[in-house]
Image (spheres, rainbow, N blue to C red):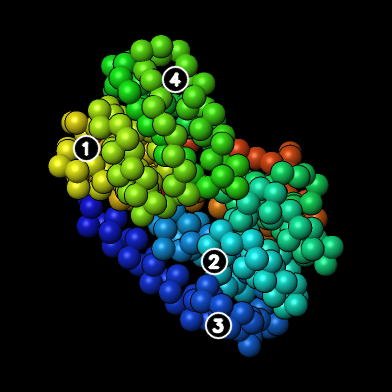
Amino acid sequence: MNRKLIAGIVAGMVLAATAACGDGGDSGDDEGPRPDAAEVEGGYVPIISVELANPYWDTEAETAKTGLEALGYQTDVFQHENDPQRQNELIDAAISQDAVAIVLDPAGADESIGAVERATEADIPVFLINAEINEEGTAISQIVANNAQGAAAGAQYFAEQMGGEGTYVELYGNPTDNNAPVRSTAYEETLAQYTDMELLQRETANWSREEGYQAMQNLLTAHPDIDGVLSGNDEMALGAVAAIESAGLVPGEDILVMGFDGSPDAVEAIEDGKLLGTVLQPIVTATDMLVEQLDSYLTTGETGADQEKQAVDCVLITPDNIDGYSLFALE
């Protein structure tokens, strides 16, 4: 496992995202397309992601940008930071700029329906990645990870490493994102068979490392004898690891922590023995699928997919297969 290689890849992608911001990207200071947008043969396709400081969403945005520009489209990258109002502004800007399509990681399953409808009514097709909306027939494609399958695999591994017994807490993601309840439900259903495992508390931490840290501090105060932590994503899991360490405990020994996403930081924590494992969301594969479907739709009128909502299976990453990891992928 080459940590320096992974760190270099991530750093390069962050720089690329920063460069995109300078051309009308996520800063919001200049939301217009670059002056030559009309001259680009494929047309203008804004990419609206969630939060580029998170390596998962940065990888999503950069993969879409690289793929679309290779096909001749003009792109800019924006972030809405899970703010539906900011998302609305970005969608409205895309409409005013005569975008030929929009790539969107939505800010809420219900909260994003209106924004997608406005773009569709303006004859701009919308392609959703990573998260879905609670409606079909408005977006052209909705490509997500198979969260239920991945969470079940993660919970099963977590239970096995816990020896099928003990107390644990759960860190829950953003409640407006359908991925949060889907993962949580799969955790609960999988662990129901382990009658000697007890869920002490479920705490919302909104996919955030900082909030995961704060939530874990509170959980340790309320339940000082916690045996394990099951987290809805890697950022919250890594926040929990930091809180465990700050309490003078040893993650991986005193308290076992399980993540979800397959981020480079999580993989490094697995290497260091601080994290049991993580569930890899194949965001590169999913985004490549979206780019292919977007281009196919704009050129032929069809995506080539059998249905609008599509799920890509997740992969469990543990110390046993970690050597095959590359950025959000497993060989």
In the figure, 179 relative to 194: above or below?
Answer: below
Which mark sits nearer the N-terminus, 2 or 1? 2
Q: Residue 29, which numbered label?
A: 3
Which mark is first along the chain, 3 or 1?
Answer: 3
Quadrant hosting residue 126 = bottom right
* Residue bearing mark 1: 251
- Residue type at mark 2? Gln
Q: Is residue 331 left or right of residue 116?
A: left
Query: Which is nearer the eye, 13 or 272?
Result: 272
Residue located beneath label 4 in the image: 191
* Precedes in sequence: disc 3 or disc 4: 3
Residue topped by disc 2:
79
Estimate the spatial distance between the alpha carbons at disc 2 and disc 3, rounded to whole Å.
12 Å
Q: Is residue 324 visible?
A: no
Identify the mark nearer the N-term, 4 or 2. Answer: 2
Percent x, y for residue 46? Answer: 63, 69
Indicate the quadrant where residue 178 lies: top right
Spot the residue most to the bottom: 35
Q: Is residue 209 left or right of residue 306?
A: left
Q: Which of 146 and 287 lies nearest the eye of the viewer?
A: 146
Please name the amino acid that badge 4 sits on: Leu
Residue 205 position within the rendered picture, expressed as x and y whole percent measured from the top left: 44, 47
Horizontal and vertical percent for residue 307?
74, 40
Residue, x 64% and y 82% (percent of image)? 32
Work out whether mark 1 precedes mark 4 in sequence or the reverse, and give the earlier one. Answer: 4
Alpha carbon distance from label 1 to label 4? 21 Å
- Whether 70 is drawn above or below 255: the answer is below
Q: Is label 2 in contact with label 3 (beta carbons under 8 Å)? A: no
Determine whether label 1 and label 4 are within 8 Å by CB: no
Q: Secondary structure at mark 3?
A: loop
For numbered disc 2, what is the local secondary structure?
strand
**Nearest-to-viewer mark from 4 and 2:** 4
